[in-house]
Image: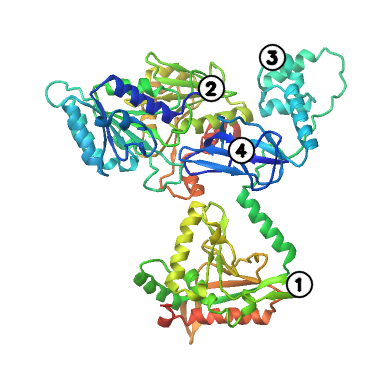
């Protein structure tokens, strides 16, 4: 059984109007087929079926529905649909619409009372005192034996279901953990020089260009030296070297995790990489991406914006071979020619599929990035 | 059949007022059809009354000042401030022209000016499109403050406000627009409500009338819904009985109709989405102290949003703005922890 839930349609509306169903009650619909048209204060939108199944319509055209509300269901076959309707009809006759406080519920449970026992009270709001009164009234009655406890099935009502977006994230990371035998390597990078230089670069470019932008740009330029790092996994024993450096970057601005892709990063200047990421940050903030921005990555970078995070093991995206993580910049003291001085460092992590990459190459790859960042200079502005 | 949405109710209020009184007009930004205003309050108004709807450039000071002059000349202008965050520009004409004009000419000059002002967050609109500026207008002589809520009918309210003779600021929380008006009686499956006060100054919301409720929440505008959610939880989880009192008029605050309810409560909360520091909630609390000192069982609790800019990201915005969780925590307070 699949629930048809009203998604968050825009920033303004918590409710929408179900304008029309696009499929009949009981009709078989396929995943991706139009299901219903809903109207918000701004526009009308089409809901599509997320699964195959027989439709059960719980809302009528013209009804108002809240975001997160279930307006219908899709069932795999007629038997489950009929069983669902049957059990719901029985539940409706058995349980009146009661509001029972926690204290009242505790007392009921201790005395094995069920909701139908409360009917004698003739109340819809049940407090502890009501249950106590009922118990006192029954004190004189002969022992009724122990009625069965009401069956608890399915998820508890307090359970929070994952959003559709987070379900997709869950599927991806589960597949990765199941299929990819990953290893991890962490390297410390002195980023004083690069950070100072990037301040100047940002001022010239008129936009924020930081370590992330530099890393994406630098990484894309390693494709020729490390073709299999940008490869696509075919099976356990083969992979396809990538002809392009489409580099995905993790972005999460509270609207869910996205990995939009900077396409052909090896052909872009540093400014262009920064422009693209700037645009993606805005989309991540809105929680809206064009499908084309999200696909076909050949390499990915996880950026951990949280201060003081030392290292993070990225979960390699299925189909790719490795993934970098860039963590916070922090200060430390170092001995430099017998003198103590402060410097800024960051940690660069590489999770890699050990079937295709060994520690030696992973180390070399990170060493190349480290060297490039530590010797960052004017020739790196990428123009 | 559900009652109309608050935005539809406000829209109808304009249409009825315009149809009845040729002196009424509307001035603001982006009001003309087919756009019909940023929040659609003025929908179809410019089509029906093309001569009486003026879409002005972004110039809150200029068009509010113009409306003040029109009101002084006997017209009845309504001003729409699209985002209350920019009403700062209109502060001077309201403070020094509209409010002063009522009494500074040696005789009382009625000023029929209504400034409607969209306020509030929880929409991800960020630091400069989400604020609640009510407190900045508190206590200006002859400037009256009102706020839209789901209970008071805006058709009646707007008709009353434009005839008031004092300039009026009407705050409209933007999260209310898409909500439905509710008619006296059942509010949901648990709560019901009725008007109290000789002039129906307050909506009183409770599960059932009680001699001494555990708590009374004074809440205006959209935070009524935070109060309601908190009251529901406090009842179901802890059997605490809460009464919610919602005024349409923020200032001057009509205390008399609710004095009895306040005196009987074990705990009083005054809540708002604005920030503490010369706030509406604090002024209400002060008024309560001055009348009920010695009879209160507990200090009045004022709840505000955090003193912070309002972030765009919704999960961060929720941490800054007053939410039902904060109200719930304050409701259960020591009575449960003890």
**Which numbered tag is attached to residue A22?**
4
Q: Which of marks 2 and 4 is in front?
A: 4
- Quarter of the figure with the N terminus of chain A: top right
Snapshot colouring = rainbow
Question: Do the CB atoms of the residues marked 3 and 2 lie less than 8 Å apart?
Answer: no
For the residues labelled 1 and 4, the Cα–Cα distance comes to 44 Å
Q: Distance between the residues labelled 4 and 3?
A: 42 Å
Q: In this view, does B113 lie to the left or right of A231?
A: left
Residue to which mark 3 is pinned? A122
Element at label 3 = loop
Identify the disc placed on residue A236.
1
Quick check: B199 left or right of A159?
left
Check disc 4 and report its element: helix, strand or loop.
loop
Q: Where is mark 2, residue-wise?
A: B1
**Residues tagged by mark 2 and mark 4 found on one chain of the structure:** no
Side of A2 where B66 appears, left or right: left
Secondary structure, mark 1, is loop
Q: Separation of disc 2 and disc 1 at Cα? A: 61 Å
- Mark 1 vs 4, N-terminal side: 4
Q: In this view, does A7 lie above or below B23?
A: below
Q: Is mark 2 on a helix, strand or loop?
A: loop
């Amino acid at each position: 059984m699949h629930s048809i839930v009203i998604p968050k349609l825009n920033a303004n509306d918590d409710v929408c109007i179900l304008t029309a169903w696009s499929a009949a009650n009981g009709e078989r619909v396929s995943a991706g087929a139009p299901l219903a048209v809903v109207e918000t204060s701004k526009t009308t939108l089409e809901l599509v079926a997320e699964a195959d199944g027989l439709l059960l319509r719980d809302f009528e055209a013209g009804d108002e529905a809240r975001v997160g509300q279930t307006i219908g269901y899709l069932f795999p076959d007629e038997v489950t649909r009929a069983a669902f309707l049957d059990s719901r009809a029985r539940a409706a006759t058995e349980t009146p619409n009661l509001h029972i406080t926690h204290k009242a519920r505790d007392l009921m449970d201790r005395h094995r009372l069920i909701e139908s026992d409360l009917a004698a009270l003739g109340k819809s709001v049940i407090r502890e005192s009501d249950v106590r009164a009922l118990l006192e009234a029954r004190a004189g009655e002969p022992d009724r034996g122990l009625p069965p406890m009401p069956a608890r099935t399915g998820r508890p009502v307090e359970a929070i279901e994952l959003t559709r977006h987070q379900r997709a994230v869950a599927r991806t990371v589960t597949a990765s953990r199941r299929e990819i035998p990953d290893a991890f390597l962490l390297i410390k990078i002195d980023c004083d020089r690069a950070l100072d230089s990037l301040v100047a670069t940002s001022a010239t470019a008129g936009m924020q260009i930081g370590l992330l932008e530099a890393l994406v740009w630098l990484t894309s330029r390693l494709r020729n030296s490390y073709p299999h790092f940008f490869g696509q996994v075919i099976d356990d024993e083969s992979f396809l070297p990538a002809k392009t450096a489409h580099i995905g970057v993790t972005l999460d601005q509270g609207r869910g995790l996205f990995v939009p892709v900077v396409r052909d990063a090896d052909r872009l200047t540093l400014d262009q990489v920064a422009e693209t990421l700037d645009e993606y940050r805005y989309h991540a903030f809105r929680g809206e991406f064009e499908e084309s921005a999200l696909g076909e990555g050949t390499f990915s970078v996880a950026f951990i914006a949280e201060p003081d995070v030392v290292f993070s093991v990225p979960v390699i995206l299925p189909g790719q071979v490795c993934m970098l993580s860039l963590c916070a910049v922090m200060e430390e003291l170092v001995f430099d020619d017998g003198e103590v001085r402060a410097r800024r460092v960051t940690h660069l992590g590489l999770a890699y599929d050990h079937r295709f990459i060994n520690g030696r190459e992973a180390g070399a790859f990170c060493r190349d990035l480290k060297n490039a960042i530590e010797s960052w200079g004017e020739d790196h502005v990428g123009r | 059949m559900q009652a109309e949405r608050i935005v539809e109710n406000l829209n109808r209020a304009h249409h009825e007022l315009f149809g009845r009184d040729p002196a009424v007009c509307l001035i603001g930004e982006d009001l003309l059809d087919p756009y019909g205003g940023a929040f659609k309050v003025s929908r179809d108004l410019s089509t029906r009354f093309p001569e009486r709807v003026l879409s002005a450039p972004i110039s809150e000071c200029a068009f509010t000042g113009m409306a003040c002059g029109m009101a002084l000349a006997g017209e009845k202008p309504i001003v729409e401030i699209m985002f209350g965050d920019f009403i700062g520009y209109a502060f001077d004409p309201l403070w020094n022209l509209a409010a002063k004009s009522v009494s500074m000419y040696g005789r009382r000059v009625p000023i029929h000016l209504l400034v409607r002002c969209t306020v509030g967050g929880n929409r991800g609109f960020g630091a400069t499109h989400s604020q609640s500026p009510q407190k900045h207008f508190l206590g200006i002589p002859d400037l009256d403050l009102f706020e839209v809520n789901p209970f008071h009918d805006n058709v009646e309210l707007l008709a009353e406000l434009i005839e008031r003779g004092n300039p009026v600021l009407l705050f409209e929380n933007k999260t209310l627009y898409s909500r439905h008006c509710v008619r006296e009686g059942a509010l949901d499956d648990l709560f019901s409500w009725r008007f109290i006060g000789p002039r129906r100054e307050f909506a009183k919301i409770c599960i059932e009338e009680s001699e001494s409720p555990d708590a009374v929440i004074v809440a205006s505008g959209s935070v009524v819904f935070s109060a309601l959610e908190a009251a529901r939880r406090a009842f179901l989880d802890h059997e605490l009985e809460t009464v919610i009192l919602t005024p349409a008029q923020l200032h001057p605050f009509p205390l008399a109709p609710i004095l009895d309810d306040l005196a009987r409560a074990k705990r009083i909360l005054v809540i708002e989405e604005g920030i503490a520091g010369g706030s509406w909630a604090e002024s209400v609390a002060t008024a309560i102290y001055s009348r009920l000192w010695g009879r209160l069982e507990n200090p009045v609790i004022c709840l505000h949003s955090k003193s912070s800019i309002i972030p765009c990201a919704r999960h961060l915005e929720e941490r800054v703005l007053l939410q039902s969780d904060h109200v719930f925590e304050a409701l259960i307070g020591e009575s449960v922890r003890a």
